[in-house]
Image (cartoon, coloured by chain):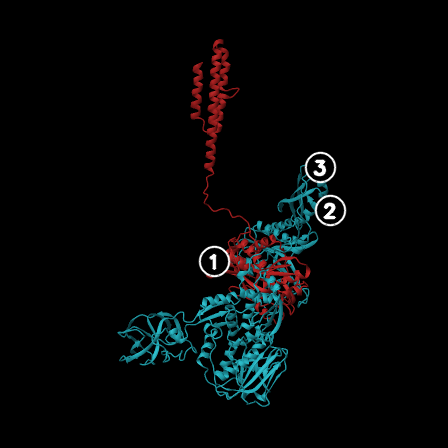
Chain colours: A cyan, B red
Amino acid sequence: MLVPLSWLKEYVDINDIEPSVLEEKLFSCGFEVEEVIEIGKDISGVVVGLVKECEPIPDTHLHVCKVDVGQPELLQICCGADNVAAGKKFPVALDGASVYATAKDHKTVEGVMKIKKGKLRGIDSEGMLCSGVEIGVQDGMYPGASYCGLLELSDDAEVGADIKPVVGLDDYIFDVSITANRPDCQCITGIAKEVAAVLDREYKAPSLEYHEDSVTKDGFTVEVKAQDICPRYIGHYVHDVVIKESPLWMQRRLALVGQMPISNMVDITNYVSLEMGQPMHAFDCDYIEGNKIVVRRAEDKEKIVTLDEQEYELNSNNLVICDGVKPVAIAGVMGGLNSEIRDTTKEVLFESAKFARDNIRKTSRALGKRTDASAKYEKGVDEYSTFNAMKRALHLVEELECGKVSCTHVDVNTGNSIEPREMKVSIAKVNRVLGIEVPTDEIVKILKNLSFDPKVNGDELTLMIPAYREDMESYPDVAEEVIRMYGYDHIVDTFLPDAQVTMGGLSLKQKKELKLKKDLCARGAYECIHYSFYSPSDFDLLNLPEDAPERQAIKILNPINEDLSIMRTTLVPSMLHAVSRNQKKGNLEGKLFEIASRFIPKSLPLTEYPEEKQTLCISIFGDKYDFYTLKGIVNAVAKSFFTDFTYEKAEKTFLHPYQTAVIKHGDKEIGYLGKVAYEVAEKLDLRTGAFICEIDLDYLYALDTKASFKPLSKFPSVNRDLALLMNKELSCGEVEKTIKDACKFITDVKLFDVYEGENIPEDKKSMAFTVTFTPGEEDFAQDSVDKYVKKILGNLKYKLDVDIRS
Amino acid sequence: MNEKLSQIRQSILVGIEKKATSRATAFELRKQFLDSKNGEIGQLMKEMKNLAAEDRAEFGKQVNELKKWATEVFEDLDKKMKEKELEFKYQREKIDVTIDADAQEKGNLHPITQMRNQLIDVFAGMGFTIYEGTEIENDYYNFTALNTPADHPARDMQDTFYLSPEFLLRTQTSSGQIHVMENSKPPIKILSPGKVFRSDDDATHSPMFTQMEGLVVDKKITLCDLKGMLDNFVKKIYGEDTTTRLRPSYFPFTEPSVEVDVSCFECGGKGCKLCKGTGWIEILGAGIVNKKVLENCGIDSEEYSGLAFGIGIERTAMLKYGINNIKLLFESDLNVLKQIDDN
């Protein structure tokens, strides 16, 4: 929120406070100042000058002037502006001054320039007479500010004086951020109250006085049909309105916070909104049909054209202000064009109302229309302000002499009090929240400055909480008020002196996860983290059929865009994109892994928590890697959990038809691995082969396997090499398993050769294995290994039709 | 005979000079003279019998001297040869040590995981256990139980991704607080790290990021304890000289609420680019757990009080490692991942 220092000064005496000190004070009591804008910071060396003589330079549009700038000598200045004349006062940029440079239109600022003595058309010029734009004076800040000639200063401007105070350039604007619990501070007076409290100074409230005459608007009624979302509606009728410009001081304040001055009636509503935090509206009574106001939910497809000439189609979620016939405003968002204030307006109805914040928020979002009013309503407007803002507006009508205040005042109230409410708190409890003893007289002083009217009776503190402090509920709130004014630097460091000792650390599952990650890193893999959502087109990337279970994904109702709209049911697409991105950056080789959740809905749309399945995805890419490199890493995953996996040939729509396997633990299928299919690789512009796997971690976390030691055998192991002849289609895994299952003393089976071709029938292949037998408690007897081998060969022949190669 | 002895002596010296080029030739030479069976010196002893008995003692003595001398000479020679050969071996293995090293295949944890582990280490040491909630939450746990009812303006502070009218992507790990407090009795000390989501996607915001929520519920927890605990934490992460500053803020689930700043670890508080000249860096939000939140979880707010804090892990990691763009953390660029190894 923008707070001009000059405006703030109206409510609290801070003439002696440096802007930097004020910034620090606001910061310390909970109002972060995001920026302090010094209005005249680019302007220097400009003074009030009086043109004493002004002679045209022949054959040019220029004049040569003698200007009094309060120095012993008059300055000679050449000037091309059309309104230069003797006897007038203008801003004069002296030699060395700094002012804004403007474009040819004399209005667009194009940076800052230094003024130096020089010659114009051969005539000495010792400075420059300035326009409003050149010294940074904007519309509304000073009369004639935007005139493209010189800025004419008023007669009482003192010759030679610094220009800044004269035109209001000696000002600062604080951009203050307001936390959501303090909607009462969304206005200048709200901030002023805080400044007064933190500086221990008096807050001077703006005048709310006005005088009603005896005029009435006969038969005028306000009917609030939607009381649940409009708890208060106040209307007041003003007659004999004279529309004109508002006074300079008001225009200036509006201009400083970026609000265009329009006309006195409209400016009053905007001014009060800024000053008191209560959005207001003014209707031209001539365009209010039926002599009534109705506050109701809009009808479906009801239309309204707002002040900015945009048409909106409404529905019953939107609250509208209507006359006897039609909507005249979207409540809390913007007024309607049909009843706007015009130059011809003679009678005005002022509106000051409270609307439900979430209703305004939803309407504002749904219509894509965010206004100053809607922003305030969304955060919350209190009825105390609703009530006082109307008074303030009527006061300003009188002060600006732009209309007469009738006695037609309608106040529809659902029964909320705006009186201060009593709160009793224990001082000991307040201090117990803080952990320090704040002296009671300090507490009393602080709460008094915040208008809580504290009364102390022993430990009991009785407060009267003003109605605008809707955030004050209990003693912790009081503790916060005390400490933010007393100063957080009084808080000392303690370390739970009274707390019980607790045991900390990771859970078993968390330890397993970390171990797995470290084991993968040890194999050269880098951990990735990807978004939990991606694009529906990612399922197409994987060539998944329409009915694939992966496509049963949870959708985000309000995604940022389509590409971030689906909760992941597989981690593969994110990983493949990561591989692709790396290759595009020239990383043609790498190992990546991610551990994250896959989201599997139990129902769609969601009516209960979905499953969040912890999943491991690994991808390796590069010319030196093959299927077995990844398989080796997957085996390392098994080792990380102190177990082993088996593999069976499988198929996936996005993987190589002959280089894909499911990963099994016992009979349980827990994942798969394979080479990324060429069709998929092509879509991603991959320049090398890539291999990918996905493994269910929840299953592995649940295993109760752990690190253990097997006693070493006292007797040496025996190795036997077996060269086997078998059907080409038979897999190594099947043969290995058959060998292993044949004898309990086998501790290892290792393939060392595969051969097809000469000396072997066409449909056959040869595989050679080294089988290791390790004795247990007793050494092998003379011929027992031979017997085991015989059994192995028997099983291979019987189960798989495998022969020993002769 | 003496002549014979000096001849042998002479041929040893000549042999060494001319023939002994390696340990092997030196050994051959040694064998020629000192071999116990056929060595030339040993052969001299056989000639003893040809000498007069009275000369034998003197000759024997001289042969022994020669043998002793030869043994020393050959031992010395062997040592020299060994040194020479070693020197030669070293020479042969001379390499250019400035040639680039072989690449070592070692991966890294993600910078976020590294930061997360460091934070967990600090708080685990203070007695915190780790609770990981779900990424998909319902409205009650994410908002209502945290004192943020439907019409609360604080819902605007966080743009929420909705999955259904009831379910959403959690906007804060604070939702974990409620699950823990509903299911356990004080004393509670948990740290809840995890992914959170907000509908924000620009240069400085990522729609997914990582938070770490801390919660302590016990008797007599105060704002001073909060400051003491966080002061302890920042010293461990950013260095012992780091100091903390609290300033008022607002979160619906804490009251009082504070923002915690640390003295700039780049400039020590003097003011620099990192801290934008203020000397302070905002690192986390915290506060005393709102009474209503405790009560929502069935904890007696008269008997117990709590403190809570929430740390943005990306921000912490970016500050610590000087990573200048949050998006880099989610792009899996190996050029980024390879740089941060701070486990």
What is the C-alpha distance between the residues marked 3 and 1? 75 Å
What is the C-alpha distance between the residues marked 2 and 3? 26 Å
Q: Nearer the viewer, mark 1 or mark 2?
A: 1
> What kind of residue is marked 1?
Gly
Q: Position of residue A335 (x, y in %)?
A: 54, 81
Q: Position of residue A713 (x, y in %)?
A: 68, 38
For residue B161, which quarter of the picture?
bottom right
Please state the chain letter of the residue tagged with numbered disc 3 in the rendered image: A
Residue A763 makes an appearance in the image: no
Residue B85 makes an appearance in the image: yes
Query: On the image, numbered disc 2 is attached to which residue?
Result: A798
Secondary structure beneath dot 1 equals loop
Secondary structure beneath dot 3 equals loop
> What kind of residue is marked 3?
Phe
Left or right of A362? Residue A167 is left
Structural crowding at the residue carrying mark 2, measured as other residues with C-alpha within 10 Å and reported as few (<14), some (14–19) or many (≥20):
few
Q: Which mark is residue A780?
A: 3
Structural crowding at the residue carrying mark 1, measured as other residues with C-alpha within 10 Å and reported as few (<14), some (14–19) or many (≥20):
some
Same chain, marks 1 and 2?
Answer: no
> In the displayed structure, would residue A557 be above or below residue A54?
above
Q: Which mark is residue B269?
A: 1
Q: Nearer the viewer, mark 2 or mark 3?
A: 3
Of A474 and A369, which appears nearest the observer? A474
Left or right of B227? Residue A604 is right
Kindly give the residue lying farthest to the front in the view shown: A458
> What kind of residue is marked 2?
Tyr
Q: Nearer the viewer, mark 3 or mark 1?
A: 1
Same chain, marks 2 and 3?
Answer: yes
Q: Position of residue B173 (x, y in %)?
A: 61, 62
Please state the chain letter of the residue tagged with numbered disc 1 in the rendered image: B
What is the C-alpha distance between the residues marked 1 and 2? 81 Å
